[in-house]
Image: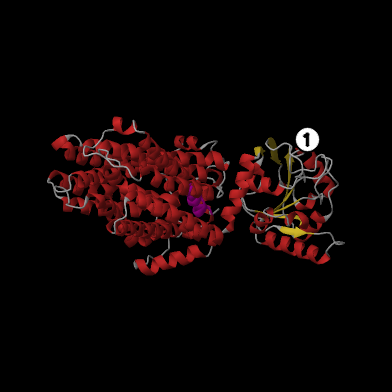
């Protein structure tokens, strides 16, 4: 953690993501972001409705293309100016930058108001581009701000709140824009007035955003967006997990932009719904994403759980493909139906369910990726890496708009487009997970501890957030490492018996996690020496290593004597040693209770415990002391 972060992050994290709304460090920024996202969509959705349902008077575009064209114009500034915005966010304090962005929003809304008042579509198209510039400048500030003010344990919840707030603002802004343009001739005047008012309100909340010292105030800004973008991508590429998180996140926006920008045309041309049906579908989509984002903290256990990414991707694929089957062959009548008649038809209920659940799984997919980027990006380059992410997002969204337009021009229907996107999502996800198996490994671990076991955790704060340490734990079952790895926030390098390491399926997880197989000196002295060399290398690199000092899985539920291996480890690498204990796994399917493990059905689902004690200085460590500590932690709950 750099000095600027330690000065502004409070000593203790909040108990829940909702508690963040009671703290200035988060609340002021949250509401500023919320109002900005809402204002974008009051204007954009109102203009999209006008360009779709009154095309002759407001732009003259093909109604099916109005949404994609407006969407592409909005994200064009992300391609042009994100590299510069990222440098500014790393060079200057983010609080005054936020105020500047809100000042620009007020000026841009004056231009947009003039376009509505004097019925000038060209000015409104310019306004779309200007609001894209506003969002481009704010993007790196938004996601680089959070790691400076939130604990690592708050990042997933904070990102979930921001994403939930963003999509709630999209929903409310779209609803407001849709309702206002339905007010007859005065509707556009109401849109102009409300948009200007919300921009001023956003400037008020921005005034309370706390200072965020820049990580690199001496940075010399490179105004060439091409060379700077390439440089930022190379910086992100230093960490493959960060880089592929960028790619995965950009794919999220590729997919999301196709659905969001086509909902208006989908509602009218495929489902035969009026403007209020568009709002209903938009509401279901954004509510689904919001709920998925909010559930991430609960499902992740207050840590960055990238295992949710494959889980989200699977759901996105399933429900986007089903959306094709639910909506194909629908033949709307000449008259557009209202919300009441629309929801009374079963075929439309299925469409609504598909949209909602696809969006909810998209929330599971996106939040861990954002948190991963923030946590693992180099702090001095964080805003620029996020700017590179925004550029990739924009390029993917432009590509999505172009692809959608070309496919529809070639005769593809919107349901067929959704089928294509669903199949593409499966292919892209498989490619990313093959490149970075950590995602899939974490998914398998997450599934294990959320379906087979209910884990009660205690003392996680005792594991250092940074720096090397050795974890020691009792050895009860064949899945001990999976349970521990699924509970701990930091990546853990396990040392385990080579026979367990070779178990099919589990071997994939162990290899991906950098697990160290070990054997006794009698069995394989070469493997033993290689294991100690790898342990030393991991600790020197500042990583976390976990060993099971008993050297074997218990076959009676009791602890076996701790061996001397821990002493050899800390003599070469004197690091803190953290005692831990697993509770309740004895008697489960994966334990040796009653004989061999995994042979007889028993205790398929059970409540287990995982408890962590304070670190012990290396000078005080002995096998006997560690065994005593672990035994006390475990207690009578074997």
Q: Residue furthest bottom?
A: 227
Could you say which is closer to the camera, residue 277 or residue 350? 350
Per the image, the residue denoted by label 1 is 635
Could you say which is closer to the camera, residue 467 or residue 416? 416
- Against 210, residue 569 (above or below) is below
* Picture coordinates of residue 16, whole percent (x, y): 53, 36
In this picture, which residue range is highlighted in magenta? 365-375
Within-10-Å neighbours for mark 1: few <14, some 14–19, many 20+: few
Q: At x 32% / y 58%, what residue is drawn?
A: 407
Q: Mainly helix, strand or loop, the magenta region? A: helix
Residue 370 magenta? yes
* Picture coordinates of residue 269, whole percent (x, y): 26, 45
Left or right: 497, with 359 as reference point: right
Q: Quadrant of residue 592?
A: top right
Q: At x 47% / y 56%, what residue is drawn?
A: 248
**Residue 434 makes an appearance in the image:** yes
* Picture coordinates of residue 144, whole percent (x, y): 45, 52
**Residue 207 makes an appearance in the image:** no
* Picture coordinates of residue 84, whole percent (x, y): 36, 61
Say how many tags the image has. 1
């Amino acid at each position: 953690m750099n000095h600027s972060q330690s000065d502004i992050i409070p000593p203790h994290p909040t108990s829940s993501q909702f508690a963040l709304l009671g703290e200035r460090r988060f609340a002021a920024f949250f509401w500023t972001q919320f109002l900005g996202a809402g204002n974008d969509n009051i204007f954009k959705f109102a203009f999209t409705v006008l360009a779709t349902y009154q095309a002759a008077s407001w732009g003259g575009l093909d109604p099916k293309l109005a949404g994609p064209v407006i969407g592409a114009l909005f994200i064009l500034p992300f391609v042009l100016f994100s590299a510069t915005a990222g440098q500014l966010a790393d060079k200057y304090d983010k609080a005054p930058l936020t105020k500047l962005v809100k000042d620009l929003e007020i000026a841009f809304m004056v231009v947009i108001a003039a376009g509505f008042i004097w019925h000038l579509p060209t000015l409104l198209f310019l306004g779309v581009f200007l609001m894209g510039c506003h969002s481009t400048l704010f993007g790196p500030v938004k996601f680089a701000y959070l790691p400076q003010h939130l604990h690592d344990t708050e990042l997933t919840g904070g990102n979930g709140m921001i994403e939930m707030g963003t999509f709630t603002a999209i929903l409310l802004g779209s609803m407001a824009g849709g309702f206002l343009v339905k007010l007859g001739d005065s509707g556009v005047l109401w849109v102009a007035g409300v948009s200007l008012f919300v921009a001023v309100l956003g400037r008020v909340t921005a005034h309370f955003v706390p200072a965020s010292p820049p990580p690199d105030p001496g940075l010399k800004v490179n105004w060439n967006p091409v060379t700077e973008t390439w440089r930022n991508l190379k910086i992100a590429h230093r960490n493959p997990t960060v880089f592929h998180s960028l790619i995965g996140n950009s794919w999220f926006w590729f997919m999301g932009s196709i659905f969001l920008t086509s909902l208006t045309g989908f509602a009218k041309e495929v489902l035969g719904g009026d403007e209020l049906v568009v709002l209903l579908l938009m509401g279901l989509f954004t509510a689904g994403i919001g709920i998925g984002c909010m559930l991430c903290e609960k499902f992740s256990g207050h840590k960055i759980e990238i295992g949710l990414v494959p889980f989200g991707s699977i759901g996105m694929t399933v429900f986007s493909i089903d959306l094709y089957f639910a909506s194909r062959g629908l033949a709307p009548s000449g008259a557009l139906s209202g919300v009441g008649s629309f929801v009374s038809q079963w075929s439309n209920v299925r469409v609504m369910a598909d949209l909602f659940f696809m969006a909810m799984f998209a929330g599971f997919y996106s939040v861990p990726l954002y948190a991963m980027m923030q946590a693992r990006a180099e702090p001095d380059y964080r805003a620029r890496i996020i700017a590179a992410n925004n550029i990739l997002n924009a390029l993917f969204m432009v590509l999505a708009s172009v692809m959608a337009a070309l496919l529809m021009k070639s005769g593809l229907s919107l349901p067929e487009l959704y089928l294509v996107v669903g199949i593409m999502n499966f292919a892209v996800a498989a490619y990313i997970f093959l490149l970075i198996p950590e995602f899939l490994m974490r998914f398998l671990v997450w599934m294990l501890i959320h379906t087979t076991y209910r884990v009660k955790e205690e003392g996680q704060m005792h594991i250092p957030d940074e720096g090397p340490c050795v974890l020691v734990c009792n050895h009860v079952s064949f899945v001990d490492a999976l349970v521990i790895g699924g509970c701990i926030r930091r990546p853990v390098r396990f040392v385990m018996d080579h026979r367990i390491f070779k178990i099919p399926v589990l071997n994939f997880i162990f290899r991906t996690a950098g697990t160290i197989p070990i054997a006794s000196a009698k069995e394989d002295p070469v493997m033993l020496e290689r294991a100690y060399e790898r342990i030393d290398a991991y600790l020197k690199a500042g990583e976390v290593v976990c060993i099971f000092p008993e050297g074997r899985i218990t076959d009676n539920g009791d602890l076996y004597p701790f061996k001397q291996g821990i002493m050899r480890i800390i003599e070469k690498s004197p690091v803190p040693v953290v005692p831990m204990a697993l509770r309740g796994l004895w008697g489960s399917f994966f334990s040796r209770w009653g004989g061999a493990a995994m042979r007889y059905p028993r205790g398929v689902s059970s409540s287990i415990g995982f408890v962590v004690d304070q670190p012990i200085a290396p000078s005080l460590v002995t096998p006997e002391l560690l065994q005593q500590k672990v035994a006390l932690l475990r207690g009578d709950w074997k």
